[in-house]
Image (tube, rainbow, N blue to C red):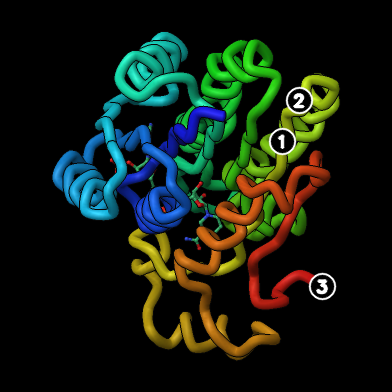
Amino acid sequence: MNKVALVTGASGGIGAAVALELAGLGFDIGVHYYSSREKAEAVAEDIEALGRNAVLLQADLADSAACAEIVEKCVQELGPIYVLVNNAGITRDTLLMRMEDDDFTSVIEANLNACFYMTRAVVPLLLKAKAGRIINIASVVGITGNAGQANYAASKAGIIGLSKSVAKEVAKRGITVNVVAPGYIVTPMTEVLSDAVKKEISDKIPLKRLGQPEDVAGMVGFLTSEKAAYITGQVLAVDGGMVI
Ligand code: NAP
């Protein structure tokens, strides 16, 4: 197995932690980013400090051709991909009554379409290798729904359906596809909330704390390991017990 992983949104909170976790497990990393080049460069430096190789991959993942291009570049620079982590994602929260067409479609495109484009671009490589792991980052709100997040919850529920279907298509070649569903994780995506709201949320979480990016990264690392070889088509919540 060629230890190469492509992590989308590796310039963000969870993606950066996932990229470093996988580098620590011996993977060379395709570090995808969209607009935060400096953050992506810092992540690549940290990966190299761990003795692994990193290649920067810039793309708007809502663009199908751009997805195919970064997969090709990653393979050229690092060799065949073994792990794909579809992590990039956005929110545009508002109540349904106020939700504009673009609020809905932009979130579906950046979250769900991107997951489809990236998965379709990588699957032929995994089929050829008869090995590989795809890990898609959804959210517990894709299971429960959430007021003010009809667009986001729909995109994450879509990722779950996509993942389960692809898991069934590729299982006979030894490839697994799983979903990690984080609860509330402290990252730039969530730091817009006030301390009072954060306290209210953590009080409702059975484990009584907000999640850290490393909590999610640990699960992703496990899913890439030999110990997870018999797990596919599953949705694994990393949420401190928010959804039990
Ligand atoms: P974040 O820090 O805001 O990072 C988001 C990442 O997505 C960034 O790397 C960003 O790239 C990238 N991105 C945004 N739009 C893009 C586009 N059109 N094309 C390509 N890349 C794009 O968010 P995070 O909290 O780490 O979230 C990571 C994933 O976990 C997301 O899928 C999110 O839905 C999911 N999640 C997060 C939480 C949470 O509480 N934080 C909970 C459940 C699920 P640039 O910065 O380079 O533009």
| C-alpha separation, residue under disc 3 versus residue under disc 1 | 23 Å
Q: Nearer the viewer, mark 3 or mark 2?
A: 2
Q: Are marks 2 and 1 in contact (CB under 8 Å)?
A: yes
Callout 2 crowding tier (Cα within 10 Å): few <14, some 14–19, many ≥20: many
Q: Local crowd at mark 1 within 10 Å, few (<14), some, or many (≥20)?
A: many
- In screen coordinates, is 23 left or right of 219? left
Question: Where residue 139 appears, x then y in whole percent?
Answer: 63, 54
Q: Nearer the viewer, residue 23 or 102?
A: 23
Outermost residue to the left = 38
Which residue lies under the disc numbered 1?
177
Q: Earlier in the sequence, mark 2 or mark 1?
A: 2
At label 1, the amino acid type is Val
Q: Which residue position holds label 3? A: 244
Amino acid marked by disc 2: Val
Which mark's residue is nearer the viewer, 3 or 1? 1
**Looking at the picture, does residue 75 appear above or below residue 204?**
above
| Residue 157: quarter of image | top right
Quadrant of the image occupied by residue 126: top right
Indicate the position of residue 134 as horizontal and vertical percent values. 63, 34
Q: Which amino acid, by three-letter code, is at mark 3? A: Ile
The quarter of the rendered structure image containing the C terminus is bottom right
Q: Percent from the top left, x then y, of residue 197?
A: 47, 81
Which residue is identified by label 2?
Answer: 166
Is label 3 in contact with label 1 (beta carbons under 8 Å)? no
Label 3, label 2: how many angstroms apart (C-alpha)? 26 Å
Q: Earlier in the sequence, mark 3 or mark 2?
A: 2
Q: Which residue is painted at 53% across and 42% down in the image?
A: 99
Label 3 sits on a secondary structure element that is: loop
List x then y, in percent, for residue 15: 41, 50
